[in-house]
Image (tube, coloured by chain):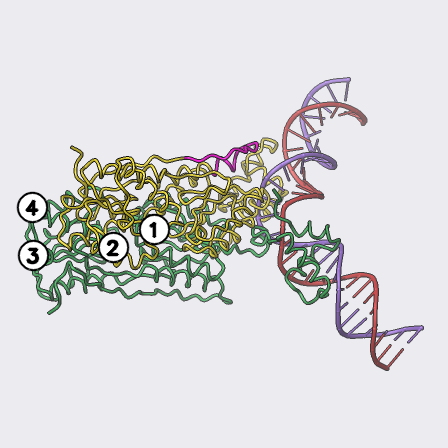
Chain colours: A yellow, B green, C purple, D red
DNA sequence: TATCAACACGAAAACGTTTGCAATTCAGAA
DNA sequence: TTCTGAATTGCAAACGTTTTCGTGTTGATA
């Protein structure tokens, strides 16, 4: 077992001052070529690597970025992380991932433990808890300290920072419009409770699409799911009490569960009922029938968010305008919807 | 914008030495109660937090652990991370996640950039590239430097370190035995190429189960998938050329794809063909019919691995025996298999 | 009054870097 | 031999902590 070698040890070994060693390793031209060669050879031999903690302390930057997400067992967030990792890595940054588990308190604690020097900037998607509580003091504190913050997907207007989102309302509008165009007349909506920003926005898109076609909005055709555990029960109740020929769900899981229930009740998909979900993940592809859904391009969202953050970290002079990037969604047509004639 | 306050600033403001401030904040009894109260009040007011980089440098420990996984868009690894996060957080550690993307080179680079002080220990699951190349020098280097390393799931015998695995062979044996007990006689195997350790082990379990029942192993009933992209093609070829009444797949994705193909060809599941997959994830639950599969308990694996690592980090005296924890798998019966009579 | 412990606080080193500037060396010119 | 300027090299501060050790003050005791 040989611990990592330090500048001091090299310096002693070679009988050269620490500063000369440091400069020689980094190939400063103010050190003679002879010395540079000698030191570099020695460093290579002993596998010298600068201690990143010391470098961080000296340079007042860690080359780490912190990512706070509500859940990781969730295909969409997973693709976002993939995108973040990709650009972070390519620009020399490491990614520290923290999970809020949809809890406000955990989100606050996570941010507090990272803000004290561990990272250079934050990438955050809000927990449900935070959205319900509408308490954003932890975000403001971080911003106050001059630490860059980029929010993605689950964002909030009250905070003035860079953001990356998809146009949820527009995407939902397009999906529901597609259902209408392919012949659906009574469309059920399976969504989340209103405080979840994306749930609310997608609900708005649903309503807009109906309104545009002059179709009245029937409240009984909408179910709002708070606790994912009992979504089956609620969906079954919907089937019990209502008739409809289309379903729009705000995520793929709800859509797939609804499809399974519909099939059990003898409905043919898409002949009797069409289905569209949000988030084009592995479930959509593998469901039977495969599910038409809205691709949110999570990887791209991660890439763009990370790029925004790192650009901000490395910008020379402070730029005070914050911008919001909107990612274009795509409706992926599969077997759960009829063809546009 | 107010940057974080430091000990030095507090010290100047209160006209007390830095060391006294430090001690007062940490409630050392060698500082008078008066001073302690005063300093603590001031610190609280100005929201003082010790700079974690400086603390890390001083204490020679970062309270970060590095996790290297092959892919994150993969339900199993995602559950492992969840488990890791949970215990790491509860014991005051942050988690730095790096993706090898199944590439040997990326795995090496990731480990090298983390080993220089950024973290206290590693949690690693090998990339396919590394397993194919059989080059483990980067792991040995890390161990040589005295940095604790715990491998999970995709491990290798050549490295002497703590490990967490499931008994892949035994689990596959049980799954295939179950198929046999429920009446299957010709069982196809959908696996990966041999250099993927878990693929190989599960294949062994499959063969053992057949041997035990005295059923000959037909090589043509096995397909080994290297590139996940063209798994559909290979599975279709299998259906074209062979007859069978059971399928065992080494992951849930292969199983679900095979089920879809079987259904398209008019087979009834499980009456004509039974299916069992490995990795009990969301796909298994949501497939139609739902897939019987082997739960690997990823969360538990993550928890145990993280616990092993942190225990190792915090142990007083060096303990030289490395241990391998084996996690019990569970066969989750669903609709894709017949009932045991 | 001298001694001593208990108490409160501060100086300084250490962790491993980076970097501006001062100090040293050396060759060549006067 | 002395001087000059360039080429090398080293000193020391700085980043923000923690911690050991030393110092000074106080009050009590002999």
- Tell me how far mark 4 sits from mark 1, CA to CA: 45 Å
Q: Are marks 3 and 4 on the same chain?
A: yes
Circle 4: is it few (<14), some (14-19), or many (20+) Cα within 10 Å? few
Pointer 4 with pointer 1, Cβ within 8 A: no
Q: Image quadrant of residue B179?
A: bottom left
Residue bearing mark 3: B272
Query: On the picture, is B233 further left or further right than A126?
Result: left
Circle 1: is it few (<14), some (14-19), or many (20+) Cα within 10 Å? many
- Asked if one can make out residue B35 in the rendered structure from this viewpoint, the answer is yes
Q: Are marks 3 and 1 on the same chain?
A: no
Query: Quadrant where the N terminus of chain B lies?
Result: top right
| Protein chain holding label 3 | B
| Protein chain holding label 1 | A
| Protein chain holding label 4 | B
Residue bearing mark 4: B240
- Asked if one can make out residue A5 in the rendered structure from this viewpoint, the answer is no
Residue B35 coordinates in the image, percent (x, y): 72, 61
Pointer 3 with pointer 1, Cβ within 8 A: no
Query: Quadrant where the C terminus of chain B lies?
Result: bottom left
Query: On the picture, is A92 further left or further right than B168?
Result: right
Closer to the eye: label 2 or 4: 2
- Tell me how far mark 2 sits from mark 3, CA to CA: 31 Å
Write the residue at 30% across / 61% down: B297
| Disc with the residue nearer the chain's start (2 vs 1) | 1
Q: Is residue B315 above or below residue B291?
A: below
Q: Are marks 2 and 4 on the same chain?
A: no
Q: Magenta segment, which residues?
A: A309-325
Residue bearing mark 1: A192
Residue bearing mark 2: A235
Residue A20 coordinates in the image, percent (x, y): 61, 39
| Disc with the residue nearer the chain's start (3 vs 4) | 4
Write the residue at 29% across / 62% down: B166
């Amino acid at each position: 077992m040989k611990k990592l070698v330090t500048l001091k040890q090299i310096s002693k070994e070679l009988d050269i001052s620490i500063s000369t060693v440091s400069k020689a390793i980094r190939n400063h031209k103010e050190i003679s070529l002879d010395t540079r060669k000698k030191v570099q050879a020695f460093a290579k031999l002993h596998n010298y690597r600068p201690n990143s903690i010391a470098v961080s302390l000296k340079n007042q930057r860690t080359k780490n970025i912190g990512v706070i997400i509500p859940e990781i067992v969730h295909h969409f967030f997973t693709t976002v992380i993939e995108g973040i990792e990709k650009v972070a890595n390519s620009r020399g940054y490491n990614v520290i991932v923290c999970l809020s588990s949809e809890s406000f308190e955990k989100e606050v604690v996570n941010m507090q433990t990272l803000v004290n020097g561990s990272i250079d900037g934050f990438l955050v998607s809000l927990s449900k808890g935070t959205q319900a509580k509408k308490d954003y003091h932890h975000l403001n504190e971080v911003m106050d300290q001059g630490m860059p913050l980029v929010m993605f997907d689950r964002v909030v207007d009250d905070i003035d920072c860079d953001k990356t989102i998809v146009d949820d309302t527009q995407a939902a509008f397009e999906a529901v419009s597609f259902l209408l165009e392919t012949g659906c007349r009574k469309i059920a909506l399976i969504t989340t409770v209103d405080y979840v920003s994306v749930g609310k926005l997608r609900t708005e898109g649903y309503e807009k699409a109906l309104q545009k076609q002059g179709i009245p909005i029937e409240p009984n055709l909408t179910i709002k799911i708070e606790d994912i555990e009992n979504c089956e029960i609620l969906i079954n109740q919907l089937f019990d009490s209502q008739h409809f020929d289309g379903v729009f769900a705000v995520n793929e899981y709800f859509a797939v569960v609804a499809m399974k229930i519909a099939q059990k009740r003898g409905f043919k998909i898409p002949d009797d009922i069409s289905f569209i979900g949000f988030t084009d993940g592995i479930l959509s592809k593998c469901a039977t029938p495969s599910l038409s859904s809205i691709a949110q391009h999570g990887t791209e969202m991660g890439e763009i968010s990370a790029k925004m953050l790192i650009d901000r970290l490395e910008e020379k002079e402070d730029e005070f305008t914050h911008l919001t990037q909107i990612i274009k969604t795509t409706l992926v047509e599969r077997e759960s919807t009829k063809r546009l004639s």
